[in-house]
Amino acid sequence: MTGQLPQINLEAREEFRQKAVSFGLNPDDKWIGGYVEYEWGKLKHTLDVVLDKDKVKILEFGCNIGASAVIAALCGHVVYAVDIKQKNIELANLNAAQYGVGEQIFFTLINPTDPLPYDDAFFDAIICNSVLEYVNDECLKQVLKQLDRVLKPDGKIIITGTSNRMAPKEVHKGKWFINYFPKSLGKLIYGNKKYQIGLHPFRVLRAFKGYENIDLLDNGKLYLEIKKRFGLSSLNLNILRFLKRVLRPFKISVGLLTPSFSVNLRKPK
């Protein structure tokens, strides 16, 4: 795959746009019609650096409209993608079609309280892109257990773009200090529709106890390489290098403390 996105199937693009409009969505929105292009500049670099095999079997948990799944397929992987909303699955199928990777991705509608419909140790890698913070508290523990169950030994889980409960400003809704409010108070102030808080990164790490944080390997070069490919400025890269040195004695990777946290983990063999 070259450095450019493939030419879009215009007929499928029009179907995607019409379906988005039918759901009350703006197809020109960055997070609808422009989502794949955005992830091409972000997630693609993470996959290129973290996954060291030519072709692996990937689960995308919480695929939304399929942008991350499309990127993984364009990188040559076979992708199984799940979501709890029928409209997301419909848009995701059309999204994959317009980029010519519909046959590489298997989209599935799931019930959030049911086990994942896959055998144990079925996947080489799992992607959780901006999704775990939306999982209900009562379901999160079981969801993380299911992700562990379906991942092969030595498999990798990529958690990225996840709103960090430790950050003073919640990244999705842009509300200051809401992460620190009791949930009942936050909902009272903002209402259920506007209420959103992040997920504590160390809660995720506890769920994957025994996993190796590969962002810490080789003195943290993997994480910095990903950020460099994102196009971060030299100033920001130097700030990350400084933070990496400060955090190294505590065995905490820099990505765990950013407003949208990220971490790349490897399951024990």
Image: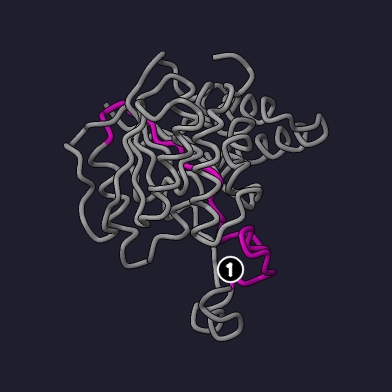
Task: Say which residue label 1 marks.
Answer: 179
Q: Position of residue 12 (x, y in %)?
A: 49, 35
Q: Secondary structure at mark 1?
A: helix
Instruction: Identify the image quadrant of residue 58.
Output: top left
Position of 58 relative to 162 (above/below): above
The residue drawn where x is 67% and y is 40% is 246
Q: Is residue 258 magenta?
A: no
Q: Is residue 163 magenta?
A: yes
In the figure, is residue 254 to the left or right of 126?
right
- Find residue 146 and report its horizontal and vertical position in percent: 25, 47
The residue segment tinted magenta is 151-180
Question: Residue 29: x and y, percent?
Answer: 65, 50
Which quadrant holds the C terminus?
Answer: top left
In this view, the residue in front, 47 or 247, is 47
Farthest residue, direction left: 119
Quarter of the image with the N terminus is top right
**Label 1 environment density (alpha carbons within 10 Å; few <14, some 14–19, many ≥20):** many
Residue at screen point 54% across, 37% down: 13
Question: Does residue 176 lie above or below 58 as drawn?
Answer: below
Q: Amino acid at mark 1?
A: Asn
- Image: 80 above or below 225: below
Compare residues 164 and 29 and report the one nearer the observer.
Answer: 29
The x and y percentages for residue 3 are 63, 17
